[in-house]
Image (tube, rainbow, N blue to C red):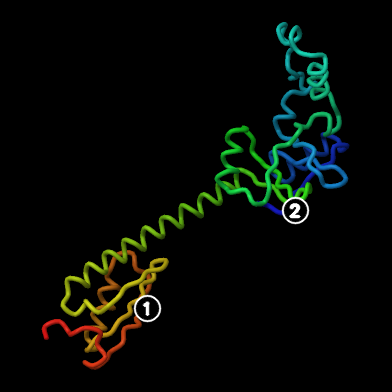
């Protein structure tokens, strides 16, 4: 969510809103009243059907016949209105700060909208856009990929240690491709070999060696071969 969103009032001129959108690179803006209550949204699509461009919606016979007078008047106001409040889409679809990313993404997809004003205690506190959803998605995908890499490193190194007679007292943990070795061994050469095994495991970027060299009474199990 982007905090302190840029918004316009319903009495602002549409050219003012258009300039803000162009200057900031936004595809839309929330429209708020004097109390910071969201009363609508103005977006690029609201500028497509304009009288100045002669792109206003043609009134097909069936629409003229079956639409109410109010609906036809609304179409006319949106095509020729000069103030944001006359052309904006209202009511706006809004969300609360506690909504999950998954729910926000689904609401955007179902509603066909690109931004969601975030409202708390009836006041706008932020805005969520499709770009925000994409950034969150990328972070989650990166975290998932990292977890998978860590799991592969841990499995590979544990398998290598399991093949060695001296590797049965060493434990492995991996966090963001950094390996931590812990446990107790009888000989400094075992400690060194474990570190070498970790360093040669594909994907490892750093090894934290916390293996202790101890005497027989301190070993957790009888040494292999004894």
Q: Secondary structure at mark 1?
A: strand
Left/right placement of residue 112 relative to residue 220 reads right
Q: Earlier in the sequence, mark 2 or mark 1?
A: 2
Q: Is residue 166 above or below residue 177?
A: below
User: Could you tell me which secondary element the residue under label 2 belongs to?
Assistant: loop
Residue positioned 26% across, 91% down in the render? 218
Question: Which residue is at the front of the view, 118 or 198?
Answer: 118
Q: Which residue is mark 2?
A: 4
Mark 2 Cα-neighbour bin, 10 Å: few <14, some 14–19, many ≥20: few
Seen at 35% across and 83% down, the residue is 210
Quadrant of the image occupied by residue 64 = top right
* Image height of 48 relative to 173, above or below: above
Q: Position of residue 71 (x, y in %)?
A: 78, 18
Q: CA distance from mark 2 to mark 1?
A: 43 Å
Tell me: 106 left or right of 149. Answer: right
Question: Which numbered tag is attached to residue 63?
Answer: none
Q: Position of residue 23 (x, y in %)?
A: 74, 44
The answer to whether residue 182 is left or right of residue 193 is right
- The answer to which of 44 and 39 lies nearer the viewer is 39
Mark 1 neighbour class, 10 Å CA radius: few under 14, some 14 to 19, many 20 or more: some
Q: Residue at x 75, y 31 (%)?
A: 89
Which disc number belongs to residue 208?
A: 1
Q: Position of residue 152 (x, y in %)?
A: 31, 61
Quadrant position of residue 3: bottom right
Q: Is residue 134 above or below residue 61?
A: below
Q: Residue at x 83, y 23 (%)?
A: 77
């Amino acid at each position: 969510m982007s905090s302190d969103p840029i918004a316009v009032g319903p009495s602002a001129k549409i050219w003012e809103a258009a300039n803000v959108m162009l200057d900031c690179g936004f595809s839309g803006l929330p429209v708020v009243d004097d109390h910071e209550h969201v009363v609508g949204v103005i977006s690029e699509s609201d500028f497509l059907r304009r009288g100045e461009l002669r792109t206003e919606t043609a009134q097909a016979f069936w629409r003229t016949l079956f639409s109410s007078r109010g609906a036809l008047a609304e179409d006319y106001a949106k095509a020729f209105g000069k103030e944001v409040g006359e052309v904006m889409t209202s009511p706006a679809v809004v969300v609360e700060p506690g909504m999950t990313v998954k729910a926000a993404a689904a609401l955007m997809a179902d509603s066909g909208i690109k931004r969601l004003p975030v409202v708390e205690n009836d006041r706008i506190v932020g805005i969520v856009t499709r770009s925000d959803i994409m950034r969150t998605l990328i972070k989650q995908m990166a975290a998932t990929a990292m977890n998978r890499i860590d799991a592969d490193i841990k499995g590979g190194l544990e398998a290598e240690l399991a093949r060695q007679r001296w590797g049965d007292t060493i434990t492995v943990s991996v966090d963001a491709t950094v390996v931590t070795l812990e446990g107790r061994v009888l000989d400094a050469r075992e400690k060194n070999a474990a570190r070498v095994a970790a360093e040669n495991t594909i994907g490892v970027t750093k090894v934290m060696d916390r293996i202790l060299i101890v005497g027989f009474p301190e070993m957790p199990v009888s040494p292999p071969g004894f």
